[in-house]
Image (tube, helix red, strand yellow):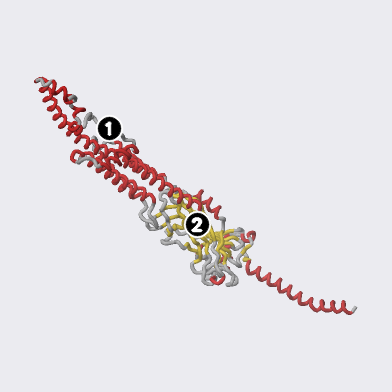
Amino acid sequence: MLKPLSQAAGFTAILPHFQIIICCLIMQSLLMKSAETISCSEPTTDGLITALKENIFGKTEIRPVIHLKTPTNISVSFSLYGILDVDEKAQKLNTFIWVNLVWNIEGLSWDPVECGTDIISIPRKQLWRPDIIINEFIDENKVPDTYYLYVEYTGKVMDDLPFHVISSCNLDIYTFPFDIQNCTFTFNSYQHTVLDVQLSFYKPVEEAFRYSLKAMTTKGEWELVDMLAEKPTIPPQEMNVSRDKLTYYIVLRRRATLYVVNLLIPSCFLITVDLFSFLLPPQNVDRSAFKMTLILGYTVFLLLMNDLLPVTGNSLPLINAFFSICLALMVASLLETILIINIQCGSTHYGPLPQWAKALFLNYLARLVRLSKKPSDQNCDPEKHRTDTKCCDPAVENPLSEAAFKTPALLELKKISHELLSIRQQVDKHLKTDESADEWMLLGQVIDRLLFCLYIVFLSVSFITILAFWLYWYNKNASLI
């Protein structure tokens, strides 16, 4: 029985301490309630404004916290209202956004019934406001000033601000005009470290993206494809010097219809005309003048369309390589035409075609490009007339008949036969010269047809390669969204 009695005596001794602790907690809660809640003299706006002036108005120097070691949580969200311009040369993005900031004033609350309202708008300059900036800002914010913000009865503050953001953006124009750009907006405090000001997302980024699509009024060259967001992690050892950050990724895609219609399609038309100009016979039509006119027209076209091309960037756009290839092919086709005309027009002054050229071009390559050599009109070789009189001189076919029949008429016929043979030999010399010229003409035709086939192959390979690069980089950028 002694043991229970001792336990009861111990409990009786501890009971006063519990009473004292409970009383302290009750008093502390009453004091905190009285410190957090403001009273209004009447349920009107004047009564609430008077109470707010006495408690929070003018306290703009320090953060609205009871203990300075308590960080202030700022919720951030924004909506994109317009994409005004994208400057590839200066690597700048020009947009108009609406930023929403939400934070809480510790020690502030009121009774909505007693004060007549649960929310009120007050001048922005009367309260402490967070120094949230966008890191990529590179120019002045040229928007009209706004002077009011909202305060709820729980101490929640909602501040909405318009921003004309001219920000830096790393623009990659390699796949122009089918490029997709990824620009960033980084929100952080200008001066306060993560120990004083912490940032969080006020709305999910998906909701901000959907609202931006609805609110966007500009339908210019660029369209909003997606919005992403992340909050970088700060190591504990860097919290004394680092700022808390929120990073938004703005994914933009260029509308390429204008550039396809004004740049790519005309270039394809001109290179097609240059391709079919190979069908013009160079010996009858001045093909070189036609090609020079085509090159001149394409050069003027590039000069007129130069304003539509991006001026600079981290890399050379593929479309510039496309235009260079088109111009190079036109120049190459002009040089080829000059070569063919030189061969065919100067064929009468050239000597016989070398045997290796005959074997390579007139026999092998001519069959490869489907060109056949015309049959010769000569029926007898003059060298053969000199050596084999049996084929060309029937008067000497039988020497016995000549000895047997030496009549004046036969001798006269023999003399005429020799004269005709001399004439035939002279004609054969001219025919031989014409045959050499024909061989040079055929050589020019074979080279022209061969270079035409190589032109088609190189043109097809070049265009397919550029198109493959365009599709590869476009799909690669699209997969990063």
Which secondary structure, mark 1?
loop
Real-space CA distance between mark 1 and mark 2, rounded to the nearest whole angstrom: 71 Å
- Give me the disc on residue 79: none
- Quarter occupied by the N terminus: bottom right
Which secondary structure, mark 2?
strand
Q: Is residue 345 above or below residue 242?
A: above
Residue labelled with disc 1: 374
417 or 267, nearer to the observer: 417
Q: Would you say residue 277 is visible in this rendering?
A: no
Residue labelled with disc 2: 249
Callout 1, which amino acid? Lys
Q: Is residue 334 left or right of residue 1?
A: left
Q: Is residue 404 left or right of residue 320?
A: left
Q: Would you say residue 421 is visible in this rendering?
A: yes
Q: Is residue 372 left or right of residue 480?
A: left
Q: N-terminal of the two: label 1 or label 2?
A: 2
347 or 480, nearer to the observer: 347
Tell me where residue 28 appears, x and y as whole percent.
68, 72
Tell me where residue 161 appears, x and y as whole percent.
49, 58
Callout 2, which amino acid? Tyr
Tell me where residue 303 appears, x and y as whole percent.
30, 48
